[in-house]
Image (tube, rainbow, N blue to C red):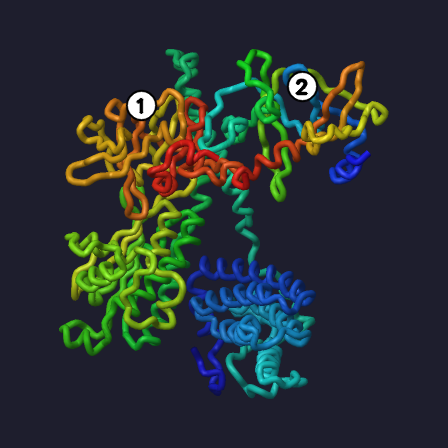
Amino acid sequence: MADPNQVQPPRAEDELEAFTADPELAGMFIADATDHLGTLEATILKLEAAPTDLKLVNDIFRPFHTVKGNAGVLGITSIQEFAHKIETLLDLARSGKHPMGPAEIDLVLKTVDLLKLIIDELPARAAGRPVTDVSARRRELMGRVDALIAGATPPPSSRQEPAAVAAEPAPTAGDESGRGKINRAEDQSTVKVDTKKLDNLVDMVGELVIAQAILAEDPALRSSDERLNRRLAHVKRITSDLQRDTMAMRMVPIRQTFQKMSRLARDLSRKFEKPCTLKLTGEETELDRKVVEHLTDPLMHMMRNAIDHGIEAPEVRRAAGKSETAELKLRALHRAGFIVVEIADDGAGLDTEQILARGRKLGLVPEDAQLDPSDVHQLIFQPGFSTAATVTELSGRGVGMDVVRRNIEALRGRIDIQTVRGQGTTFSIQLPLTLAIVDGILLAVGSNRFVIPTFAVQESFRPLPEQVQTLQGQACMVQVRDRLFPLLHLGEVFNIPGARQRISEGTVIICHDSGKCVALAVDELIGKQEVVIKGLGEMFRDVRGIAGGAILGDGRIGLILDTGGLLSLVGKTASQVAA
Amino acid sequence: METLAQGAASAAGQTSGGKFLTFTLGNEEYGVPVLKVREIIKVMDITQVPQVPPHVLGVINLRGKVIPVIDLRRKFGFPATEYTERTCIIVVDVELSPVRVMMGIVVDTVSEVLNVSDAEMEETPDFGGRATTDYILGLAKVKGTVKILLELDRVLGSDGQLGRF
């Protein structure tokens, strides 16, 4: 970041280079920042009523932080530095080192106003049109922050930072009066819609698709009437177009997230003095909005891990005959109906021996167990597992790889590791295209129907009687090749009338979650089906083993199984499970 | 009467008359405020959900929405009976602070929409702990019969938080 005392202010045109180059990103930045600043005002006013509420201070801090970060990504230094200044004050406030008095609140409000003005005028500035000269006001506000932090009363005008950072070469317009004159440069070409409404729409369209399928299969409509068939086909085409387009509405390119990563990589590389380059591929790959939102944190964590632990120090790299500058790759792509996001480094790779030793020490691995290297690598996803000898400021904070995996599994995705000692590590995250629909396997237990997500299923088979291991007369384990799996009889544990009692007459499904497996005994598999996921609502929040419901082809509801919840039911009887 | 306090606890004015949808459970006649009723449907396929009390029958597909269904007979301790062609599901709105949810309640028969005047309303007498009365809005004496008017949010509210049982 630029030294705040540097004499030469960056020229506005340079600063807006990235802004002008990517109108889409620029538009997103403005929409996002305006949004954040809008919510900020309300929060600040709340804080005014309750100045000691640190949660509110935190709520104010975060939007500033985001705006600052996004401005940084676009290289708009003037905004970034300005926001950073206020952030410093807020940071002191939220850690309780600086009380938020009327002067502070007033200052923050003024900052929001000014930021709004600057951001509103960005398109005009980028287009070279005249805009309000805000440099004096900004300098004054920044000076007041310094004064407040120093514990002094705010100075009447700017004097703390003479000729500080950035000045927009704005030819005209007086201060306050100029605000009203600026017309919104662009016509609105986008509409903001509440994501809830969008989710509802996607849901309803999902239902429409299913309803249409039911209708098309109705025996009463199965006629050889050419005209009717043509009309039905027409409805079908419109329905599927509609579905595709509504799904697309929720999709956003992963670009923004990737850009955050490239910024992070740059900062971390300097911090750890490990020169590296980050290569981005597939930034235009589109993902469900929700997925993107929840992907940022895990990716940031993995990026930190890669630079802090994955990449060796330059001298080590030189000694190993590698280029001193490490290469990081971040890419997104479509693969077989999934989105894959990969983060790769060319660092030291995972140390299998060390991980195994640590796993033994933590009691995660029995002393005498022989594990495949790939099984050993899975250990890093265990809670509380960390092999870094020293906890560094960034990587040692908060989440570990167990949280990364949990986050990814919450998105119904999975994460894999490929690593070669001395050559690097690649983490690949596989995610479903959308969260609204799950690809599932339909199964029957008694007259009930269940759907288990395909990604959770490892294999299914009809067990031979000798594969079923009993304990005190109760079936409890299933042996598959050399492995024993704990058995869960779905009909029994869910107390379903009419479920087949003998396991060897039904089907067993091996499913997994978080590296653990369970054998599920059901009556039979019916087939594969894509279903729209519906929440069962607050009332069934505490039901274990059920993730939601899906409306099936015949209009009935099938319950969607949640493998993680099922695992927690192993070894319990129906009466223990019942509410 | 002591139950005045309860009457006051429910929204003001609710103990006065109004329009109620009445239905039967066994030999008793009940009523719910018409404004709470969304629609009345025939009993349809109900998908059981595990790990819930017996009076929670499961979920149904109401034109693409998944909504829970409660058996009011079992909830009130009546013996279970076979469903007949007169058995109905009344779909109602229930306030489960902070959300409002739709639920279905299974009843023996739906009778009529009844106009209850203020004069016909009686506050719930104190039964001395023999019957739970906190979800009764009041009693209405109409044409010689007594209708038990239900405060739906209280009847079903506790089911909204099954986890706390």
The quarter of the picture where the C terminus of chain B appears is top right
Quarter of the image with the N terminus of chain B is: top right
Q: Mark 1 lies on which chain?
A: A
In the figure, A418 relative to B9: above or below? below
Residue position for label 1? A501
Location of residue A458 with respect to A122 vertically, above or below: above
Circle 2 residue: B23
**Whole-percent x, y for residue A106 in the image:** 66, 73
Front in this rendered view, residue B145 or A212 = B145
| Residue B37 shown left or right of residue A357 in the figure | right
The disc numbered 2 marks a residue on which chain?
Answer: B
- Residue A57's spot in the image, x, y percent? 58, 67
How many dots with numbers?
Answer: 2
Look at label 1 and name its amino acid: Gln
Relative side of A162 to A477, left or right: right
| In the displayed structure image, the side of residue A34 where residue A353 appears, left or right | left
Few, some or many C-alpha atoms within 10 Å of disc 1 (few <14, some 14-19, many ≥20)? some
- Between A289 and B11, the residue placed more toward the observer is B11
Along the line of sight, the residue nearer the viewer: A523 or A103: A523
| Residue displayed at 34% across by 66% down | A304
Measuring 56% from the left and 63% from the top, which residue is drawn there?
Answer: A59
